[in-house]
Image: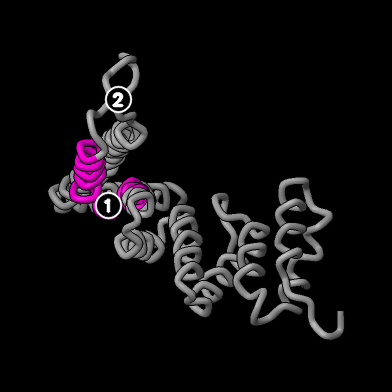
């Protein structure tokens, strides 16, 4: 077979491949268009979803800021246009519960809802309603919304300790020592744990507090104060 024939054969083969490719594209053009449309739709959905989430987050944060203003409101006649005032404590309480309640109802699984529940728990403590406070703190602690969950767990431990439920308080505080957050430091949880177990496990309480005596001033002062309340053992 001469070179010309080989060249012709190669040219024919190339033409056949092109023809097959064109036929394939023609046959699958609709499928390709559908796939392309789906990909574009997914991209647009993702971008739209992110935009929507940003708007939602902005709305949640604005609602939370407004609720916090109400929580910090003063009682009495309005004397400042930039502050919120209520005529009575009862009126303020109703406004606070409504503002935070709306956040919880509208955005139940959000971080802002966790913060709202914590605020309601704190207000319950101020009013001496410890059962309501525990309920709110338990909800936040169980939500997994860190670092707010850790703060709620810490507050819950304080309530348990105040009620004499030392085992429950100890369990929560040991978990916080093992997994500190930006709102509940390891040192803070350690000092609180030592205070809770001071009477039942004084030796361990001292071991927890002694290393903190040389920490930064605030931690050192708290550790020294806690050490002063740890009962001495027979060996001391």
Q: Residue at x 41, y 47 (%)?
A: 7
Instruction: List x then y, in percent, for residue 88.
Output: 23, 34
Give the class, few, some or many, for how many residues have Cα within 10 Å of label 2's Cα (few <14, many ≥20): some
Which secondary structure, mark 1? helix
Q: Residue at x 28, y 25 (%)?
A: 76
Give the class, few, some or many, for how many residues have Cα within 10 Å of label 1's Cα (few <14, many ≥20): few
Instruction: List x then y, in percent, for residue 16.
Output: 27, 52
Q: Nearer the viewer, residue 149 or 196?
A: 196
Relative to 4, 17 lies left or right: left
Q: Is residue 13 visible?
A: no
Q: Is residue 108 part of the magenta span, yes or no? A: yes
- Please give the residue where the numbered disc 2 appears in the rendered image: 84
The secondary structure that most of the magenta stretch takes on is helix
Give the CA separation, mark 2 to mark 1. Answer: 82 Å
Q: Residue at x 68, y 58 (%)?
A: 187
Q: Is residue 3 visible?
A: yes
- Please give the residue where the numbered disc 1 appears in the rendered image: 16
Read off the magenta span. Answer: 90-119
Relative to 23, 233 lies left or right: right
Which secondary structure, mark 2? loop
- Foreground mark, 2 or 1, reads 2
Count the marks: how many?
Answer: 2
Image: 69 above or below 198: above
Instruction: List x then y, in percent, for residue 152.
Output: 44, 58
Residues at marks 2 and 1 touching, judged by CB atoms closer than 8 Å = no
């Amino acid at each position: 077979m001469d070179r010309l024939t080989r060249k012709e054969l190669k040219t024919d083969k190339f033409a056949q491949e092109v023809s097959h490719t064109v036929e394939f594209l023609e046959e699958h053009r609709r499928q390709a268009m559908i796939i392309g449309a789906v990909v574009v739709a997914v991209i647009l959905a993702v971008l739209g979803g992110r935009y929507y989430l940003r708007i939602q987050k902005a709305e949640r944060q604005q609602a939370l800021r407004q609720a916090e203003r109400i929580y910090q409101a003063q009682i009495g006649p309005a004397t400042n246009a930039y502050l919120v005032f209520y005529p009575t404590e009862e009126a303020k309480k109703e406004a606070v519960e409504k503002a935070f309640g709306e956040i919880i109802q509208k955005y139940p699984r959000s971080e802002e809802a966790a913060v709202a529940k914590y605020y309601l728990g704190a207000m319950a403590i101020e009013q001496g309603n410890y059962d309501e406070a525990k309920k709110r703190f338990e909800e936040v602690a169980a939500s997994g919304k860190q670092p707010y969950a850790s703060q709620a767990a810490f507050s819950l431990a304080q309530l348990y300790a105040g009620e004499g439920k030392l085992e429950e308080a100890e369990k929560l505080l040991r978990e916080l020592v093992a997994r500190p957050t930006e709102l509940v430091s390891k040192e803070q949880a350690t000092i609180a744990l030592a205070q809770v177990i001071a009477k039942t496990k004084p030796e361990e309480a001292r071991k927890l507090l002694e290393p903190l005596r040389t920490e930064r001033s605030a931690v050192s002062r708290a550790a020294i104060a806690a050490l002063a309340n740890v009962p001495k053992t027979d060996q001391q």
